[in-house]
Image (cartoon, rainbow, N blue to C red):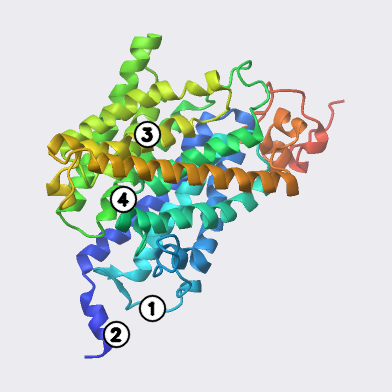
Amino acid sequence: MTLAAAHAAEIDTGDTAWLLAATALVLLMTPGLALFYGGMVRTKSVLNMLMMSFVSIALVTVVWLAVGYSLAFGDDVGGGLIGGLDHVGMSGLGPDSVHGTVPTLLFATFQLTFAIITAALISGAIADRTRFGAWLVFVPVWALLVYVPVTHWVWGPGGWIVERLGALDFAGGLPVEITSGASGLALCLVLGPRLGFKKDAMRPHNLPMVMLGAGLLWFGWFGFNAGSALGANGLAAAAFLNTLAAGCTGLLGWLFVEQKRDGHPTTLGAASGAVAGLVAITPSCGAVSLLGALVVGLAAGTLCSYAVGWKFRLNYDDSLDVVGVHLVGGVVGTLLIGVFAVESMTGGPEGLLYGGGLGQLGRQLVAVAAVGAYAFVVTYGIAKLIDKAIGLRAGEDQEHTGLDLTVHAETAYDHGVLGHGAPVSASVLPSAQKVKPQA
């Protein structure tokens, strides 16, 4: 038997079929996120919000295939900090190369979809006021300097968090949720608040779009979490059920807070609560029992519903609550592994409530602090450099009129920009939208 045939024989077709489907599900999450975010902004910047997500697919894919995958999942060369360059341009990874029981190329593509949505998530924190050209520079630089190293720490061979510290993260609480939330906070601080922040009403313009986006995110999240088992097996089934359960209790927890605090359960609250529960269960879906998943989701839905109000007290303009949902939810889910982890899921480590003591909780806390601090500091530095070099924030006139018209020369709706600032000059309208004066 040839070496290629031996490798091919190791590929499990059932596991491969499941991971192919999971990869497609996770990729779908980024268009779902685009709709979720697009519905939450005002009409004058809808298309810009959609574009920030969609262009992230292209930018991160190029970076990941060129060097990102090799640095994240290549053999460690930096004391647990970074991988090597053996697979630059995906070299050495043919169709018969195997990762576990699936083709390595499929595993690399699955991980690519995680990197894509993580970058896209950050855009929600800086909606309505970021130069599109600056975003095109920020995304690939951030992916290389923040996402790739953290991914190696958590999941890469020899990564210090997984192999030295012993912290657990099944599907991305650290590299996805906490990095995006901490990075979003850094960008908020560099950019400053939107014009009219805390003065003007900045309500979502299309709640049905928000709900549709949340539904697509929830659907894709099954691939995100259950797919991280890398096989069609019992662990994938448990992660799938935990994901569903936590999304439900997250939704209910948020609505309970709204009803008690505001007297009204809202559609935006339902969508946000579900997402908060899904964020929190991401790191823990492969470590906790069903009961633990229910508690994790409920805790995230409740705490995140309060956390989204911090920006008004602390005066940072997290436009679409990336900090309040993804950072806070990611911290909740990652830390609660240290409380609710069970041996039947982890294969060894147990949480505080199951006789594991404080050890695992301490390891989770160290991982959260290290990743959050690293992502914040490096992102802050990247943003400052881009701002100094080419400018990070859109001009005041662009922000006032809306980025759809001034940057993309389009509008999401006929006359959708009217009523959101100063009258639009004909000079910023595309020729098809210029109207001749009536006689």
Disc with the residue nearer the chain's start (4 vs 3): 4
Q: Nearer the viewer, residue 378 or 40?
A: 378
> Residue 321, percent across and down?
49, 30
> Is 165 above or below relative to 202?
below
> Residue 200, percent across and down?
63, 17
Q: Nearer the viewer, mark 1 or mark 3?
A: 3
Find disc 3 in the rendering and name its residue: 329
| Numbered mark located on residue 94 in the image | 1
The reply to whether discs 1 and 2 touch (Cβ–Cβ < 8 Å) is yes
Camera sees residue 243: no
Q: Residues within 10 Å of mark 4 (few under 14, many from 20)?
A: many
Q: Nearer the viewer, mark 4 or mark 3?
A: 3
Callout 1 amino acid = Gly
Callout 2 amino acid = Ala
Residue in the picture at 19% in, 42% down: 341
The reply to whether discs 4 and 1 touch (Cβ–Cβ < 8 Å) is no
Q: CA distance from mark 1 to mark 3?
A: 38 Å
| Numbered mark located on residue 223 in the image | 4
Q: Residues within 10 Å of mark 2 (few under 14, many from 20)?
A: few
| Numbered mark located on residue 4 in the image | 2
Q: CA distance from mark 3 to mark 2?
A: 44 Å
